[in-house]
Image (cartoon, rainbow, N blue to C red):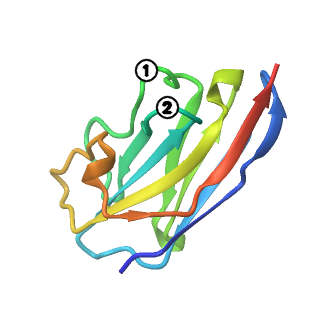
């Protein structure tokens, strides 16, 4: 059972930056996919950024809507992933969730779908005003 705790959300003006953190209670020795998702009111949950803790070719990957503005990173020693969000826009306003899928290997390309992840954090609100 992996427990995830997000932090770092808040309110910011358009063009500003925020950095989200996601601390995991454990990383498996075989690797873990970490993903960041977001959900705005009335909208479906959207995958934003994905990374394999083992580090693979092609990682990390991003949704087109955030590419060039958001950066996902990881600190395996601290069992933490980060989402650096720059040049924020009002349309980035949402509840942000981190998610984990343990038991992956060095060939696993972490998927973008919410159903591919086994564990979820409680979410942290990001609000961007114009």
- The disc, 1 or 2, on the residue closer to the chain's N-terminal end is 2
The x and y percentages for residue 64 are 43, 20
Dot 1 alpha-carbon crowd within 10 angstroms: few under 14, some 14 to 19, many 20 or more: few
Q: Residue 29: horizontal and vertical position, in percent?
A: 28, 76
The residue pinned by badge 1 equals 64
Whether residue 17 is visible here, answered yes or no, is no
- Asked whether, in this view, residue 109 is left or right of residue 95, the answer is left
Q: Tell which tag, 1 or 2, sits nearer the viewer.
A: 2
Seen in the image, is 84 located left or right of residue 108? right
At x 59%, y 56%, the residue is 123
Is residue 7 at all visible to an observer of this figure? yes
- Mark 2 neighbour density, 10 Å: few (under 14) some (14–19) many (20 or more): few
Picture quarter with the C terminus: top right
Q: Quadrant of the N terminus?
A: bottom left
Side of 75 where 113 appears, left or right: left
Q: Residue 11 sits in which quadrant?
A: top right
Coordinates of residue 46 in the picture (x, y in percent):
43, 35
Name the spot of residue 94 as percent of width and height, x first: 62, 38
Label 1: state its secondary structure.
loop
Do the numbered discs 1 and 2 sit on residues whose CB atoms are within 8 Å?
no
Q: Is residue 73 above or below residue 90?
A: below
Which residue carries the number 2 mark?
43
In terms of image quadrants, where is residue 57? top left
The disc placed on residue 111 is: none
The residue depicted at 22 percent of the width and 44 percent of the height is 109
């Amino acid at each position: 059972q992996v427990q995830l705790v997000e932090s770092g959300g808040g309110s910011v003006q358009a063009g500003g930056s925020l950095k989200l953190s996601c601390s995991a209670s454990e990383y498996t020795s075989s690797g873990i996919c970490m993903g960041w998702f977001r959900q705005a009111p009335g909208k479906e949950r959207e995958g934003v950024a994905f990374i394999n803790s083992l580090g693979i070719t092609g990682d990390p990957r991003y949704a087109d809507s955030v590419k060039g503005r958001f950066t996902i990173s990881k600190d395996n020693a601290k069992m933490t992933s980060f989402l650096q969000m720059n040049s924020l826009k009002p349309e980035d306003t949402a509840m942000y969730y981190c998610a984990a899928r343990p038991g992956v290997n060095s060939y696993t390309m972490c998927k973008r779908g919410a159903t591919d992840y086994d564990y979820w954090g409680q979410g942290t609100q990001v609000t961007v005003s114009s």
